[in-house]
């Protein structure tokens, strides 16, 4: 606290991202990064973009990347918004579309950045409890509200919601914007992109950080009705005209041109996840069914915080949330086959 701070700053509770320690030999399974590198075509595009032209500002409209995304997802360029990671896209969406007189609804267990944005913008919100199976129940959202947001698959549970259930939420709230945060959808979830043409209140947000292995490049995007996109553009252009630099624009577009690499790496992650889920279950863990690139699991006889500390002592880091309902769970990102094996070895020692 400093006497130079504004009242707003004094009142904030910022989001704390998973740590990024720089220790040699660390098995890092705490921030849902992809164990496989970006496509070689992305790396080539980045090298090609590292030119004297970096002295020039990038395209403020990001039109080439937007067109690539529009073609890839079968929408028009007016239905595409891009930003510096999906965190930035979400931040702009909270301000542009989710602040209303009636409260914003989101699950009690979901992405812990949502309440942080609410605090920043002064958005009134109400959390809706997941059911006993830790699932989103659409009927629980049937109440007057200003807007709705949820991750699908949900984080940190990894549990996905079927498209019919997403559609029932959209149908119940034609007057409210519904944001579906699909950061993990490529690992087995059902994307709501197919519903955009029929629901002008739907905004789908995705990222290149997970399934396209580009967390370090910072690119996310939103797809939705042109009116929703225009709202995002208005806020973006009141804040930062150039959220994506020349390298990000080139690398992100190249990623969507290498479909074979995308399919191969995402299937590898899904395969490792299924194998790891079986191994954890064999050790007595209760493993939630994941459609994401992480597993959320608890052990009936071992305290999660102690397990996390024991893993850390063995150079394996996973994420533990000291929060109601989930304090006995560990969130374990799916690493390479070797990393998964190291995790299993360390857990066997601990148990
Ligand atoms: N949404 C969810 C549900 C996430 O877990 C994350 C990753 N922390 C993000 C959005 C943001 O990812 P990024 O900013 O890297 O696109």
Image (cartoon, rainbow, N blue to C red):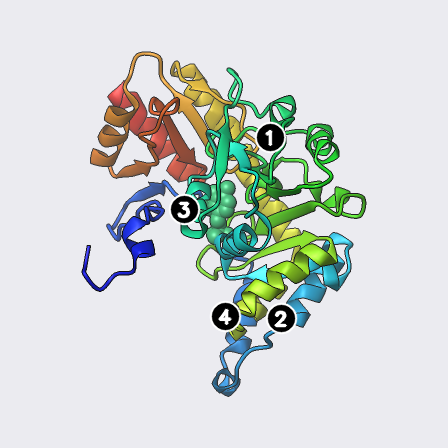
Please tell me whether mark 2 or mark 4 is closer to you in this view: 4
Please tell me whether mark 3 or mark 1 is closer to you in this view: 3
- For the C terminus, which image quadrant? top left
Between residues 309 and 126, which one lies in front from this camera angle? 126
Q: Dot 4 lies on which element?
A: loop
Please tell me whether mark 3 or mark 2 is closer to you in this view: 3
- The residue that appears at 71% across and 41% down in the rendered structure is 175
Give the percent coordinates (x, y) of residue 114. 46, 43
Height in image: 135 above or below 173?
Answer: above
Between residues 276 and 182, which one lies in front from this camera angle? 182
Q: CA distance from mark 1 to mark 4?
A: 34 Å
Give the percent coordinates (x, y) of residue 58. 55, 78
Q: Dot 3 lies on which element?
A: helix
Give the percent coordinates (x, y) of residue 227. 72, 57
Mark sitting on residue 287: none
Give the residue at mark 3.
119
Give the residue at mark 4.
240
Height in image: 230 above or below 350?
Answer: below
Report whether 80 appears left or right of 123.
Answer: right
Give the residue at mark 1.
160
Give the percent coordinates (x, y) of residue 168. 72, 29
First in sequence: mark 2 or mark 1?
2
Give the residue at mark 2.
62
Query: Dot 3 surroundings within 10 Å: few (below 14), some, or many (20 or more)?
Result: some
Between residues 166 and 308, which one lies in front from this camera angle? 166
């Amino acid at each position: 606290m400093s006497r130079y701070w504004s009242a707003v700053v004094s009142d904030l509770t910022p989001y704390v991202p998973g740590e990024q320690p720089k220790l040699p030999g660390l098995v890092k399974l705490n921030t849902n990064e992809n164990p496989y590198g970006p496509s070689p075509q992305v790396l080539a595009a980045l090298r090609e973009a590292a030119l004297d032209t970096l002295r020039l500002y990038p395209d403020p409209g990001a039109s080439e990347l937007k067109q690539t995304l529009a073609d890839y997802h079968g929408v028009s360029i007016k239905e595409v918004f891009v930003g510096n990671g999906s965190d930035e896209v979400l931040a702009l969406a909270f301000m542009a579309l989710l602040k209303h007189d009636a409260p914003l609804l989101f699950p009690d267990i979901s992405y812990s950045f949502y309440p942080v944005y609410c605090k920043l913008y002064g958005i009134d919100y109400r959390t809706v409890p997941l059911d006993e199976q830790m699932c989103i129940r659409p009927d629980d959202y049937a109440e007057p509200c200003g807007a709705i947001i949820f991750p699908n698959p949900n984080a940190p549970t990894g549990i996905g919601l079927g498209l019919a259930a997403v559609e029932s939420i959209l149908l119940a709230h034609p007057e409210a914007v519904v944001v579906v945060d699909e950061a993990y959808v490529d690992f087995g979830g059902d994307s709501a992109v197919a519903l955009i043409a029929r629901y002008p209140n739907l905004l789908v947000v995705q990222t290149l950080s997970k399934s396209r292995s580009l967390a370090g490049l910072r690119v996310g995007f939103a797809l939705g009705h042109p009116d929703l996109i225009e709202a995002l553009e208005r806020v973006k252009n009141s804040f930062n005209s150039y959220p994506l630099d020349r390298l990000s624009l080139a690398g992100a577009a190249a990623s969507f041109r290498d479909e074979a690499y995308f399919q191969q790496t995402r299937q590898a992650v899904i395969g490792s996840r299924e194998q790891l889920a079986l191994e954890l279950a064999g050790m007595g863990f209760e493993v939630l069914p994941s459609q994401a690139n992480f597993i959320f699991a608890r052990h009936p006889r071992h305290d999660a915080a102690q397990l996390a500390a024991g893993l850390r002592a063995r150079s394996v880091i996973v994420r533990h949330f000291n929060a109601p309902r989930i304090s006995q769970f560990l969130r374990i990102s799916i690493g390479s086959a070797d990393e998964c094996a190291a995790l299993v070895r360390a857990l066997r020692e601990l148990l």
